[in-house]
Image (tube, grey):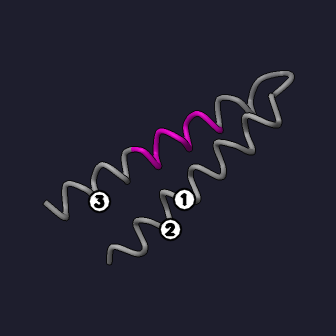
């Protein structure tokens, strides 16, 4: 069960990374959205680190 949780967090982290890249590659990226996505990504990363 622990590994599936880590896998889910990894997938979420990768999804957030993809959304950040997509947003920052736009001509006029939404800085507030990018900041929010980065905060979410950091929370996921911290949760993954806490599980090991």
Q: Is residue 31 above or below residue 26?
A: below
Q: Quadrant of residue 18?
A: top right
User: At numbered mark 1, what does the secondary structure look like: helix, strand or loop?
Assistant: helix
Q: Label 2 crowding class (10 Å Cα cut-off): few <14, some 14-19, many 20+?
A: few
Left-right relation of 30 to 3: right
Tell me the magenta residue range: 12-20
Q: Which residue is mark 1?
A: 43
Q: Secondary structure at mark 2?
A: helix
Q: Quadrant of residue 48?
A: bottom left
Q: Residues within 10 Å of mark 3 (few under 14, many from 20)?
A: some
Q: Which residue corresponds to the image point at 37% horizontal and 45% vertical from the top-left?
A: 11
In the image, residue 16 above or below residue 51: above
Estimate the x, y position of residue 52 in percent, counting from the top left: 32, 78
Q: CA distance from mark 1 to mark 2?
A: 5 Å
For this rendering, which residue is in front, 26 or 49?
49
Q: Tell me if mark 1 has few (under 14), some (14-19) or many (20+) residues whose alpha carbon lies within 10 angstroms of its own.
A: few
Q: Are marks 1 and 2 in contact (CB under 8 Å)?
A: yes
Give whichever of discs 1 and 3 has the lower sequence position.
Answer: 3
How far from the left and from the top, in percent, is residue 26? 77, 23
Indicate the position of residue 42 as horizontal and vertical percent values. Answer: 58, 59
Residue where numbered disc 2 is placed: 46
15 vs 50, nearest the viewer: 50
User: Which quadrant of the structure image shows residue 2?
Assistant: bottom left
11 in relation to 18, above or below: below
* Residue ID at (19%, 54%): 4
Q: Earlier in the sequence, mark 3 or mark 2?
A: 3
Residue on which the image places disc 3: 6
Pair 1/3: label in front: 1
* Percent of width and height locating residue 9: 37, 53
SS category of the residue bearing label 3:
helix
């Amino acid at each position: 069960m622990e590994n599936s949780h880590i896998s889910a967090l990894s997938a979420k982290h990768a999804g957030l990374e993809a959304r950040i890249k997509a947003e920052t590659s736009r001509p006029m990226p939404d800085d507030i959205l990018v900041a929010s996505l980065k905060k979410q990504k950091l929370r996921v990363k911290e949760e993954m680190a806490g599980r090991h």
